Amino acid sequence: MNRGMSRMLLTILAGALAVFAQSTVARPDRISPRLAEQVRHELVMMPFYGVFDHVSFKLQGRKVVLLGDVSRPTLKDEAERRVKSLEGVEGVDNRINVLPLSPYDDRIRLASYRAIYSNPGLNRYAWGPLPQIHLIVRNGTLTLKGRVDNEADRNLAGILATGVPGVFEVKNQLIVQRG
């Protein structure tokens, strides 16, 4: 093989390796959105996940960090089990808090559910398989989490929550969804 042909072959091989290296580097970027959607789907499909729970997550490469609060201790384990079983997940850091089992907090949960979801201005948020406004109650403190369409709905939910008997404090963490 002559010298010119060897250089050309090396150039082609180097180019092919560069393309391969770029595709290998770009691969995690394509996996992250797909993995995020799979994790989200698994979490919202948990059978006992409801309006009194709020679970979120963040991805750190292929590691999933679970965050939030649940009213049933079994939901914490269920969330970790479901996420661990997904293809592409290399580890799970479960930081989900289990809310205290308390009849007092249970009364606040029911009263706040009635106050918010029976209101004609907010009852549309109860439609669908999972209500959009989550009611997290811990030791008399009511935290509103989720998404609403506008600032007026956010404020109305906060006002109705402060009127619930037995609530010591209301934290309105609702996010206004734009567009």
Image (cartoon, rainbow, N blue to C red):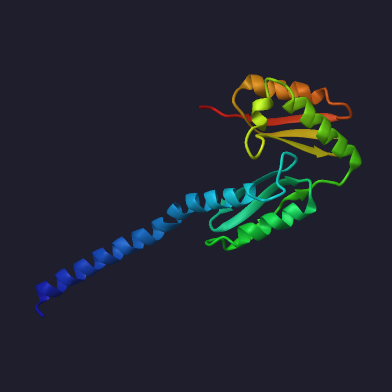
Give the camera-side residue of 90 and 4: 90
Q: Quadrant of residue 138?
A: top right
At 83% from the left edge and 22% from the top edge, which residue is drawn? 163
**Residue 28 rendering spot, x and y as whole percentages:** 45, 56
Indicate left or right for 148 with 31 as reference.
right
Indicate left or right for 86 with 113 as reference.
left
**Residue 30 rendering spot, x and y as whole percentages:** 43, 53
Instruction: Indicate whether 160 appears above or below 73.
Output: above
Q: Quadrant of residue 82?
A: bottom right
At 81% from the left edge and 46% from the top edge, which residue is drawn? 99
At 74% from the left edge and 45% from the top edge, which residue is drawn? 69
Image quadrant occupied by the N terminus: bottom left
Instruction: Indicate whether 173 appears above or below 60.
Output: above
Indicate left or right for 155 with 87 as reference.
right
Name the residue at the bottom extreme.
1
**Residue 39 rendering spot, x and y as whole percentages:** 58, 52
Q: How many marks?
A: 0
